[in-house]
Image (cartoon, grey):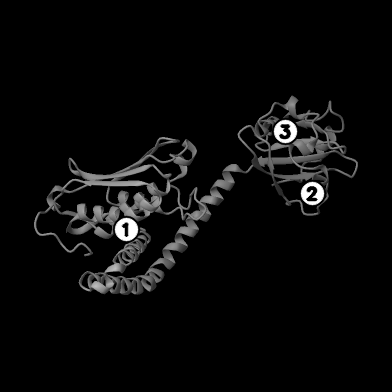
Amino acid sequence: MPTATLTPMATAAASPAGCLALGAFDRLPAGVLVCDLAGTVLGVNARGASILARCAGEVVGQPIARVLAPLPDLLALADDPDPDRRREALCPHPDGARPLGYSAARGDAAAPVVVIFRDLTAERSLREERDRLLRMAMVGDVLPSVLHELRNPLAAVTSAMENLVEESLEDAGLEPHQLALHAVLTELRRMSLVFQGIGSVGRSLAGPRPAAVDLAIEEASRIMEAKAERSGVALACHVDPMPLLPFDLSVVRAVTFNLVNNAVQACRSGDAVRVSAGLQGDRLRLTVRDTGRGMTAEVLAQCLRPFFTTRPNGSGLGLVICREAVEEAGGTLTLDSAPGLGTAVTVLVPVPPARRATGPLPPLYGD
């Protein structure tokens, strides 16, 4: 931020009457403010008043500490030998505190202090978006190797647990442990769906061959029943019978699981989640509706941004992964929500008629 040409203004500001007499300062794109050595604002240009969301008369005569920053900080900045030195501060604004960047200068030790400042809100938003994209890129780089290391042992443990469950049905001695074994197996399958969801980054719902989409949606919903029950949430699933459709079952399960998981987490005890799916013309429709807390307009506007979350331990990636998978297949993901009324997420994905098929169902856990 330039600070080298402020001496004329500081001279003009030697008295309140002369402060900002130079009309050129009103044409500057940055805010310009002058204060005396007692810390009182002597004047502000038009852009500065606009940034502060006040008229000039409301700013002039105010202590500089209430407007921008404490006087000692400004004096130290003005006397700094580095003319490019800049600081940032959160300043009062009708819409909430706003970040401002400012630099200061003065002609000599007895001269008023001239401050140039600007609103950093847009700049911070760009930096945050850049950081989100960088984190997203890092996640994409490390995911394949991490998932490979986790999936293999998880598959082995799941297979062993499935064998134990089968043995418990035949061995009377294991019968008392059936519920516990089923609970462990359910959690293992839920973990598998979590990994499938994370591994779906950049993948499309569209698949290479027809598959049993209706069964995949029911399976992903059923795996969430235990968690919903522990939370006191009633989970219901109704899926219309459908022919085999050309979708990737692992991505279908991951999208369904993410949406149902989000819905259950948004609910309180006594609330309900309903999953419905079927064909709507030439499109696959999946709707997850809950009667939970709902979202404010502000949260709704941001919930599809990478890493945005309202939960302390949330990743902020679930909805983003779902939307990308749906849009890669030419579909849409829409949200309808209001505080106290719950949330509905609707997925619509076109199904090419020529690629539909009927016939024997493939294995439920097939690719």
Q: Position of residue 199 (x, y in %)?
A: 35, 62
Mark 3, residues whose alpha carbon is within 10 Å: few (<14), some, or many (≥20)?
some
Looking at the image, residue 38 sits to the left or right of residue 290; the answer is right
Q: Quadrant of residue 14?
A: top right
Q: Residue at x 40, y 35 (%)?
A: 341
Q: CA distance from mark 1 to mark 3?
A: 54 Å
Q: Mark 1 or mark 2: which comes first in sequence?
A: 2
Mark 2, residues whose alpha carbon is within 10 Å: few (<14), some, or many (≥20)?
many
Q: Which residue is mark 1?
A: 203
Looking at the image, residue 171 sits to the left or right of residue 50; the answer is left
Q: Residue at x 18, y 45 (%)?
A: 240
Q: CA distance from mark 1 to mark 2?
A: 51 Å
Q: Amino acid at mark 3?
A: Phe
Q: Amino acid at mark 1?
A: Arg
Q: Residue at x 49, y 58 (%)?
A: 134
Q: Position of residue 123 (x, y in %)?
A: 58, 46
Q: Is residue 285 visible?
A: no
Residue 270 sits above or below residue 158 on the image: above
Mark 1 touching mark 2, by CB under 8 A? no
Q: Which residue is mark 2?
A: 77
Looking at the image, residue 94 sits to the left or right of residue 79; the answer is left
The residue closer to the viewer here, 230 or 354, is 230
Q: Amino acid at mark 2?
A: Leu
Q: Position of residue 109 (x, y in %)?
A: 89, 44
Q: Secondary structure at mark 3?
A: helix
Q: Which residue is mark 3?
A: 25
Q: Secondary structure at mark 2?
A: helix
